[in-house]
Structure formats: C-alpha cells, structure tokens
Amino acid sequence: MDFKHLLADRTNQMGVNVIREILKVVAQPGMVSLAGGIPAPQSFPMEIIRELTGIVIEKYASGAFQYGPTEGFWPLREVLADYLGDKEIKADPGDIIVASGSQGVLDAVGKVLISRGDMVAVEAPTYLGALQAFTPYEPEYVRMDTDDDGLIPGSLEDVLTSGKIKFVYLVPTFQNPTGRTIPAERRRQIAAIITRHNALLVEDDPYGALRYRGRDIPPIKTLAPDNVIYVSTLSKVFAPGLRIGFCLAPAQIRKWLVIVKQGIDLHTSTFNQALAAEYIGAGFLASHLPNIIDLYRPKQEAMLSALDAYFPKGFKWSRPEGGMFLWVEGPPGFDMEQAYWQAVKRKVAFVPGKYFFTTRQEGLETMRLNYTMTDEETIRASIKTLSEVIRGQERH
C-alpha cells in the first residue's frame, strides 16, 4: 500500500539532517571525523555515573522510576536554579522546564510560537538543528549579518525595524557552527535593541561551560530577562545520551511550553533527571568539568596550530576561546563541497558550511571543523591532508 497520500503537508518542509547523513560517511572504516559536534566518550564521567546510580536508587527509590511532573523533577529544578545563578541568571526552580535535550525545547518553541509564514530572524550562519526544529512549522527565515564577533547589532536593528519578526534565534557563546562569541558590549547593545522593540530572543547556550581561555561573559538573559527564552543542556558537560535540556522562559510562554510537552512525552526521564540532580547538587559537575576542559583544550590548540602551519593564504578561521568548533572561510568562489568529497577520498570528513545558511548559494566557500572526537596527532595529520586537498583544488 502507498501511504504517501496520508502524510501531513508539513512533511514537505522536513528533510534529513545533513550532518547526520555526513556522519554515515564518517562511519566508513578508517575515516577521520572532523565533522560531527559530538562530545568525546572520554569526557563522560563513567565512574561518577556508576556512583550516582547507587545514590539515586538509595535516595529516591521507586520515585526515580515513576511518572513525574511535566515541568521536571523538582530536585533537579532546584539545583538548576543555583546553576543558573552562577551564570548571573536569576531563576526560581518553579520557572525552569526540563526537556529531552535542548532540541526538545527548540521544537516546543517552534510549535508554540510559529504559524505558517511567520518571520524568524537567525544569524548567517546559524545552528542547523534549530532550523530543523523550526522549519516544519513553516516560518520564513530572515538572515542577520555577522562578523568575527558574531551578530552585528545594526543588522538586528534593521531586521526588527523592517518587519514583524516573531522571534530572534541566537547562539551567542561559542556558536555552532563558527565558534564565535558575542562580546559583552555587543550583548548590551543587543539587549537594548530587543527591549526597545519589545522583541523576543531565544538564546541557545549549549557550549558556554566549555571555556578554555578568557573570562565568562554573562548571557543576554541577564540583560533583558523579560525578553529572552534561555535554553541550555547538560549534554556537553554530563552525557548526551541522557537527554537533559532545560529552559527559562517568560511566564506566558512557559505555560504553553508545558502544555506542548505534555502532548509530546509527558515528562523527561525521571531517573535521568535524578542522576543530573545529584551530579550537579553533590558537586560532581564542578569537580569533573576541569577534566573535560583539559581534554578539549589541547585538541583545539592542535587544530589551530595545524591550520596556521598548513592552510594556504586566502583562507581564514575563527579562534574561539572555547566550545567545539572552528569555522574556516576560503576565498570567494572556492567550492568547499567539492573539497569535501575529495577529502573523503583521503579519509577525512568535515561539514561544508553552506548547510548552516538559510540563503541559497551563501557560504559555499566555508567549512565547519570539530576537534572533540580526535586526538591531537590525528588532528594535525588531518588538517595537513585537508590543506593538500584545498591546494590541489586551487590548482585546477
């Protein structure tokens, strides 16, 4: 039987995650992946998780395996309030919603806020997973200009002045895909613009804890609390398979996010939330995070030094103080997708940057590189291979 006629119209807007498809290529034997934004398994606190499992069963007994409130497991919401307080975000536990990863929050935001044809403002480039979450609800994307310091405030001002934007979506700290971080002064300008226009900002902060150098910069939520939905996750600092994300939203929106979640999954895994509550509350996160930083910092430094050593003139790249990604820009007219297929033949994979743009033909000369899943020696060798691929393509 052909079931195509039964599919909802919105499936016309859905597509496979391009990066997930690229990762299928990465699965080939001998392939080196500089592609996916995947935490290193060595970063998972396995011994701590073994200890936490015993603590949770002893402390919460059958309660850790029972249905729970849609908003989230109360002990986790309590420790998350303190966790956000360390970021200078004022939060009451009752204001926090726990979700199945931050991706679950983004889908709920799309379902609650986007009607067909609504305009959603995004950075150019932006996080592909957000586009996948929002696109089935059929928005029109409005691109905002960026530079080496992230979103340009004047572009945000122009966008909010020129049309009725439903909301603005940003990843201000160690952005995926570029690794860029919006500086403090620019954040103040963005907060002032958002407030003046009475606009709504969705601030996605999955990477903020992964800082290798420099000082933390307070989230935009601290500067415009009534105008920001703050979204974050424990996937990068605990374990992604546990699927623990959370958000802090204005009350009128929070109500609808809860209603939407009730229809999706009733609530996030109680047991996983209990593990997270003890991981944060008993100080395990604070003690383990330096291990993650020490794991990733030399990997990033190896990639940056290899780019300096091997990549040809005419190419430039971001130099983030943390996160999981570097962004490389080639000269205008360079075809990075063609370079990708040549690199795959040499057993090195990355993500062509064009997939992170909402405007066709934009970003053709760009690539995203990830360093978390590969050791330093392999990173250096792989960057050397990429440079050879690029030089070979330039000669042709």
Image (cartoon, rainbow, N blue to C red):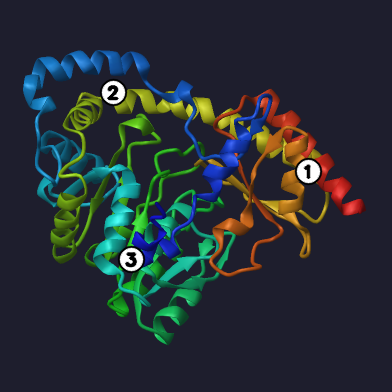
Instruction: From the viewer's side, name the closer residue of 242 and 221.
Output: 242
**Residue 8, position in %: x, y?**
34, 63
Q: Residue at x 80, y 56 (%)?
A: 314
Q: Residue at x 72, y 46 (%)?
A: 340
Distance, label 2 to label 1, CA atoms, is 44 Å
- Is the residue marked by circle 2 packed among few (<14), some (14-19), or many (20+) residues within 10 Å? some
Q: Which mark is residue 201?
A: 3
Task: Say whether residue 54 is left or right of residue 291.
Answer: left
Q: Which mark is residue 284?
A: 2
Q: Residue at x 78, y 59 (%)?
A: 334
Distance, label 2 to label 3, CA atoms, is 32 Å
Q: Amino acid at mark 2?
A: Phe
Q: Is residue 236 above or below residue 10?
A: above
Q: Is residue 132 above or below residue 266?
A: below
Q: Which residue is mark 1?
A: 342
Q: Amino acid at mark 3?
A: Leu
Task: Say whether residue 262 is left or right of residue 164.
Answer: left
**Residue 37, position in %: x, y?**
51, 40
Q: Are marks 1 and 3 in contact (CB under 8 Å)?
A: no
Chain-order first, disc 1 or disc 3: 3
Instruction: From the viewer's side, name the closer residue of 221 and 126.
Output: 126
Chain-order first, disc 2 or disc 1: 2
Furthest residue toward front = 1
- Is the residue marked by circle 1 packed among few (<14), some (14-19), or many (20+) residues within 10 Å? some
